[in-house]
Amino acid sequence: MSRPVATSFFSPRRSLIIAQSTVTQLVRMKVFYFLAPIALLFLGLQFFDAFWYEGPEALMPEQELRMHKNLCLGTMMLFTSLFAIVSTALLIPGDIEDRTLYTILCKPVPRLDYLVGKLFGVIAVIFIAMVVMDVLLVATLHFRTEEKLIETTAYMTKIGYPEREIEAGRAEISAHGPTLLLQFGVISHFLKACVIAAVALLISTFSTSTLFTIATSVMIWIIGAFQSIARDGLFNDAEFGDVPTWADKIVGTLVSLIFPDFQLFEAISDGAARAEDVLPADMAQLAGLSVLYVGIYVVLSWFVFSDKEF
Amino acid sequence: MKRFKTIRNLLVIAGGLVVTGYLRMPVEQRFTEDLRERKIVQPRIESDAWSEMGQTSLAGTFGGLRTVMASMLSLNAQSHFEENEWYDLKKDYEVITALDPYNAFYWSHGGWHIGYNAASWARSNREFSPARRRIMEMDFLEAGDEFYRKGLKYLPEEESLWFEIGSMWSNEYKRPNFERAAEAFEKARDSGNPVYRRRYLFTIARIPGREIEAYEEVIRLLTENPRHLAVPTFRCLLIVLPTNPKISDIEIKPTIDGVFRTREKAYQDLFNYRQRVLEEGFYAGNIDGILLNLIGELGVPDELNPFLNPSSHRIHTEHWRESDDQPKAQVPDWMLKKKEEGAR
Amino acid sequence: MSDVAAVEVKNLVKDFKGPFRGGKVHAVRDVSLTIAPGEVYGLIGPNGSGKSTTMKAVLGLVAPTSGMCAIFGRNSTKVDSRSEVGFLPENPYFYKHLTGAETVKFYGRLCGMKGLELKHRVEEMLELVGLQDARDRRLKGFSKGMLQRIGLAQALVQDPKLVVLDEPTAGVDPVGSREIRDLILELKNRGVTVFLCSHLLEQVQEICDRVGIIHQGVLVNEGRLDDLISLEDKTELILENASAELMEQIRSLVEVTHGAGVISEGRARTTLESLFLKETQSKTTGVPTKSRRVSK
């Protein structure tokens, strides 16, 4: 029998094993069934026409496509964020309650491996769900865009627009279709879900109940949407109004330092949905910040978890 | 011991977040400002908009669903339009544009509802006295104007909003104010859009005392882009504006033959232009003189002579286009007869 | 045999926060014990005496308030110390979504095993604990005894040098209990050190080499089993087919010997467990005797 090698500080392989087990656990808990109503919503949007917007009030095709994207991306964001919070919040306390954790930690498994494995298991499930939703989004948006292109071309030809203007109109509609830019929006929501999962992981390491973990994580998710306002107040005094009080500054500082800025993720997603120029450099920066956030939360989680007694 | 550990852990967590916060904050702020400059980050919601928001919108804002809430609210706002609930609709659009201010569609649509539909409703609502209707109509027009301008603060590059302000103030079925319309069209024309440029020209051509400016503008447009000649009113202004006695030393004096393809076409366009002079206040110049000359030259029948048979009808032809690849216009019979006789 | 103790506990003290403000619960008070490699050590005591806490301290699940625990010379708080340890907790729970085979495989992988070696080992362990038929059944459908057995399988999957068992036969029927006992003896024969806690004193008596008795956090007694339970001044004599005359002669001899006396006399007794096993196994038809094969 080959003897295992000396246990290193961190083993990606061991973390992967725990991640795989987490994925199996979540899949066998039938979490992907939640994708069914989402799929129905996406498909329903495909056939949804703002029928009351007809004649002169008719929605421009770009606006229709934009609405489609906004609703789909918003749904994806809600699902992945809530899933990240709930599943992470349930995992560690569940293992402690079931004492499954004892048998794992009695093997040569550093606690960091365990934490990272759990987190990446949740992230893997979110990723799979995102891929499925993305495929649905791209498919429904593609068909919707094609429909709008045909309608608009026919209309403009009937009116007698010159060919180049028809082409320009088509290009404008296509820009709101399933482009690479849209994927930036999807990726930004995925990154946000990863950060939220890491937040929930940190809280679950010192929380005494799952409910507390979920409630606190949701609060952080909400506050994160406004963190940039507090930060703006520090960098731009005028944002606070006439004279920021000491209390304003202290609260603003604490909020900016402690809470993550989720507005950046939403902004990139909104920009992508509006077909604004979101650059690969922006995505790289966002990914870098996400890695930083996840890293911080994992390290702090490890600090708390490392001397936790069971 | 356990309590000490808990406190220690919380302090370490807080300390770790604070330290890393100091490191990441400047990076995030720079990133945010860059995105804000490029209008990717939404601006903060203004305080008055907060108070207008319902619970659902608020919840959506907290959850980072601003654009989604804006989409849903815009669909909902339609019901206020159908019920003529203009104040509720205005509030809705204020919330919608607060949630998604970088979407020109909402500013355009909201302004249209307020400045056009609400104003029209006020004008035609017999429930109120005429004086009251006038006041309400003006209130809605001003509110529409304000709404568009607010949108322009967020989207200064969106010239279409200036165009809509100009259209609103130049609409002959409302309370036209061509000075305000011209001001708006002047801003819109900076985009270079030929439609916007022509609308500016047409508007200042309706303002007494600005004929010289209008003439300079028409020549400028012609020089920059002869395709403007495709538009009948443009062609007519080219002929009519130089008849202003204040315009002298004209270097380029357009002629009927140079501007219109045929004299018959010239008559058709100028006849219709004269109607616009009478109905919409376009610059008249010596339009009557020009038409009389053409009537004599072409032998125009009495029913098409505006001096003998004044009416509000226009001379229409089907499929009339200026470019060669378009189908030829269907010339009226009387014009065809003249041509045949001429050919013989 | 190596000089390094399999388990060494030195002056272990473990306090927990008490129910009242500022109060403490002294779960373990200055416990010291040593388990030599290849020994079977039983730690017994009433509920709440500190057995589990001691065990957890040895396994690194709790940090000592003071004192030290080591496994084969490595500090228990270090992860490395667990590479040679298999642990079966009391009332073991495992991931219910995994099947029997997946569970053993999961723990094997955590110990660094992989490939064919792991695959064969999983089959071996399932056969060892008699769960081949349940290999593809999810643990949520397992009975208590089956869970105990799968717990043993995962504890042994990496062929550890030290096995820590917390109430290994709790809730297990006598047949299973006997099998576990036999397994422990087999492990002992292979030189594996076993550290177990149990309330079932008879079983502890059968299998342990050394025993420690812990009460209110204090190790009140410890030593070789034979030394602990033998009554110095009493001798037991079991005779087979002894006649009444022989018995009379023995009684007379004792009476004339100064200081000696007959304390009790009667028929030797078997144990209820042996009787149970005898009765149940003889009445079971078609069940082949399990062959146990533990390979290195």
Image (cartoon, rainbow, N blue to C red):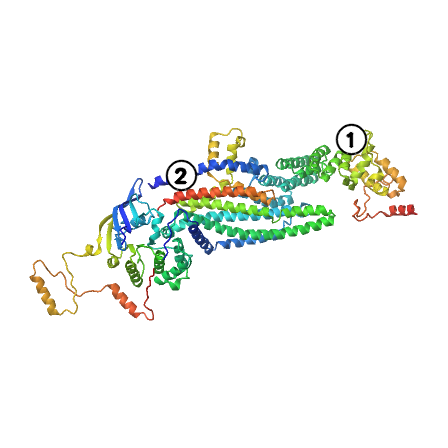
The residue nearer to you, when weighing B59 against B185, is B185
Quarter of the image for residue B211 reads top right
Q: What residue is at 62 percent from the left and 52 percent from the top?
A: A142
* Of the pair B113 and C260, the residue shown nearer to us: C260
Q: What is the crowding at mark 1: few (fewer than 14 residues within 10 Å), some, or many (at least 20)?
A: some
User: Where is residue C237, by image quadrant?
Assistant: bottom left
Identify which amino acid the numbered label 2 is placed on. Answer: Val
- Please state which of residues A265 and A29 is positioned toward the viewer in this rendering: A265
Disc 1: which residue: B212
* Pointers 1 and 2 in contact (C-beta within 8 Å): no
Q: Quadrant of residue C177?
A: bottom left
Residue found at x 56% / y 46%: A185
Seen as rendered, the residue at the extreme right is B344
Q: Secondary structure at mark 2?
A: helix
Does any portion of residue A265 appear in the rendered image?
Answer: no
Depth check, front residue: C26 or A264: A264
Q: Where residue C106 sits: x, y (%)? A: 40, 55
Which chain hosts label 1? Answer: B
The residue at 85%/42% (across/down) is B262
Q: In the image, C163: left or right of B231? A: left
The Cα atoms of the two marked residues, 1 and 2, are separated by 76 Å
| Residue beneath disc 2 | B12
What is the x, y in percent for residue A60? 66, 46
Is B150 placed above or below C216 here? above
Above-or-below relation of C111 to C13: below
Q: Chain of mark 2?
A: B
For the N terminus of chain B, the quadrant is: top left
Tell me where residue C55 appears, x and y as whole percent. Answer: 30, 50
Q: Is residue A97 left or right of residue B258?
A: left
